[in-house]
Amino acid sequence: MAQIWVDADACPVPVKEMLYRAATRTSTLVVFVANQALTVPPSPFIQTLRVGRGFDLADNLVIARAAPGDLVVTADIPLAAAVVDKGALALNPRGERYTPDNISGLLEMRNLMETLRSGGMVTGGPAAYSQRDRQAFAKELERWLLGRAA
């Protein structure tokens, strides 16, 4: 049965809360993977996996365990690219779906922006997480949950 994997270290609290409710409401296993201890509500449908502090350990665990049809919640585009290649769906906490059709372009843009940032040509980070982002994520999460049940 398809499940949800969460790259939990940088996942916004409102997204985690939506996932807690969805897990219980739909009896869907949600696994939060992080390199720090997480506090989650008690539920047979919510699990945490803690990895060490090494570079990309959480990402590597999600890549290894995600299966076709699973949903991976992450803002990490290289992680998204790897799980999309395995047949999983990846969803950004802002509600953007990563698909085979858009992932290569998003990865190229991410690499370009990283180069510009490291050269000091671009500064700053993403905009604050907004109500609009929450709504977009909730809509895409529900779309996945309904599609999984179909």
Image (spheres, rainbow, N blue to C red):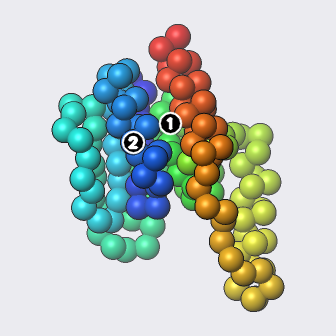
Q: Residue at x 43, y 73 (%)?
A: 55
Q: CA distance from mark 2 to mark 1?
A: 16 Å
Q: In which quadrant is the N terminus drawn?
A: top left
Give residue 8's position: percent from left, percent from top. 41, 55
Q: Quadrant of residue 5?
A: top left
Direction top: furthest residue: 150
Q: Residue at x 59, y 55 (%)?
A: 129
Direction from residue 141 to residue 124 in the image, left or right: right
Q: Could you tell me the amino acid type at mark 1?
A: Leu
Give residue 106's position: percent from left, percent from top. 74, 55
Q: Residue at x 35, y 22 (%)?
A: 25
Circle nearer the viewer, 2 or 1: 2
Q: Could you tell me the amino acid type at mark 2?
A: Glu
Q: Nearer the viewer, residue 92 or 82?
A: 92
Give residue 126's position: percent from left, percent from top. 66, 65
For disc 2, the marked residue is 17
For disc 1, the marked residue is 71
Helix, strand or loop for disc 2: helix
Decide: is 1 above or below 88: above
Q: Are marks 2 and 1 in contact (CB under 8 Å)?
A: no
Q: Quadrant of residue 57?
A: bottom left
Decide: is 149 above or below 36: above
Direction from residue 148 to residue 119 in the image, left or right: right
Can residue 146 be seen by looking at this rendering?
yes
Labelled disc at residue 55: none
Can residue 90 be seen by looking at this rendering?
no
Q: Earlier in the sequence, mark 2 or mark 1?
A: 2
